[in-house]
Amino acid sequence: METKKLYYQDPTLREFPATVLSCEVAGEVWKVVLDQTAFYPEGGGQPADHGLLHTAAGEVPVTDVHERGGAVVHTCAAPVEAGTVVTGVLDWARRFDHMQQHSGEHILSGLLCRLYDCDNVGFHLGVETVTIDYNTDITWEQALEAERLANEAVWADRETEISYPSPQELAALEYRSKKELTGQVRIVEFPEADRCACCGTHVERAGQVGLVKVLSCQKFREGVRMEILCGGRALRYLSGTYDQARAVGQRLSVKPMEAERAVERLEEELSAAKVRIADLEQTAFAAIAAEQAGRGDVLLFQSPMRPDSLRRLADAVGKSCGALAAVFSGEGETWSYALVRSGGEDISPLVKELNEALHGRGGGRNGFAQGSVRAGREDIEAFFRR
């Protein structure tokens, strides 16, 4: 049984008639083979098409498609009896998205491989992004240059060329391929950008890709892994990024393109404020420590503070009181603690008892411990009165 592959004859075909050749149950789904189909089966890094089979009895969802020995097998949510005449309807938004991503990847990869003498050694068209692996180190600046050229190729809007060269023609042809090929080879060409052996579906003209955007280029194995978006995905991503930049700009009273500099100013102001706070804390902690001088074991409660500040206060009080300083910061039933025992005596047994009694977690050694408890202030005070 072999299925006529309509997706190669016309990649824009959205609806088609077909006859069911076979239908086999496979667990909770059914495997349906048609005499012809426009549903593209998963392959070459491109996911399968989804859609519906319309029958006289109703609609049957197609949730996956694979090729098996020339037959295209449709995974269906319900059985369709052999001999039934159906109308297949593609989820066109999904198909066109895949065509945009796959075609954009071809254009970008063709340019990268030509410019930087590399090979595309991995391709995955995911639900959110497209990842491509290259076997040569590519800098971010080089990736952006290839992105610029890829978009120029898209805007030139040349027609996509599909051919099936003879063995003699193929031998004389320069094209990209991840592996040695035998038999009939399908060549997909985007003029001035790429020529590659490929079994996937592609846009009819480069302009339908719309836009190519490189999101990242990171070291991966012997080369790099690049993350890209094309077409509608790229538009939605960049629109969301702009909306976010605009919202940030409004909060900082600047234009979206000036948000980065405004954030830098905020960071400078925050760093200066942290230094000032640290100085003020040092003065306040010294005053608190002075009040506890020579008092022996001390239990203090403070409003919520950063872990580092809590540690510094406990350290200052521990040195002043000459015994155990237990400082808790927080409110209600949630408290962070820092314990300091003067002289550096082992504090582990106390921490263990504290955590068990007050539903806490944390630890330490050599006279210092830090953690948190879930208990009221009265319970904490009762523990240290024992």
Image: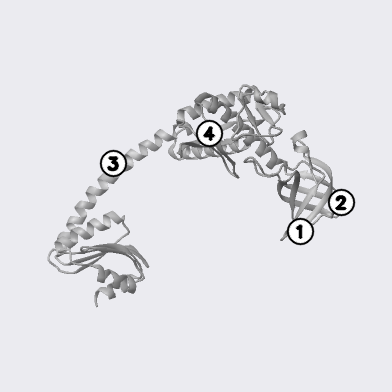
Specify which label sits upstream in the sequence, 3 or 1.
1
On the question of residue 133 being in view, the answer is yes
Camera-near label (3 vs 1) is 1
Q: Which mark is residue 84?
A: 2
Specify which label sits upstream in the sequence, 3 or 2.
2
**Which residue type carries mark 4?**
Val
Q: Looking at the image, do the residues carrying marks 1 and 4 touch, with CB atoms under 8 Å apart?
A: no
Specify which label sits upstream in the sequence, 4 or 2.
2
Instruction: Determine the residue positioned at 51% across, 29% down.
Output: 118
* Residue that mark 4 sits on: 214
Q: Residue 59: x, y in percent?
A: 80, 52
Camera-near label (3 vs 2) is 2
Camera-near label (4 vs 3) is 4
Q: Secondary structure at mark 2?
A: loop
Camera-near label (1 vs 2) is 1
Q: Which mark is residue 272?
A: 3
**Which residue type carries mark 3?**
Ala
Relative height, residue 297 to residue 176 (above, below)? below
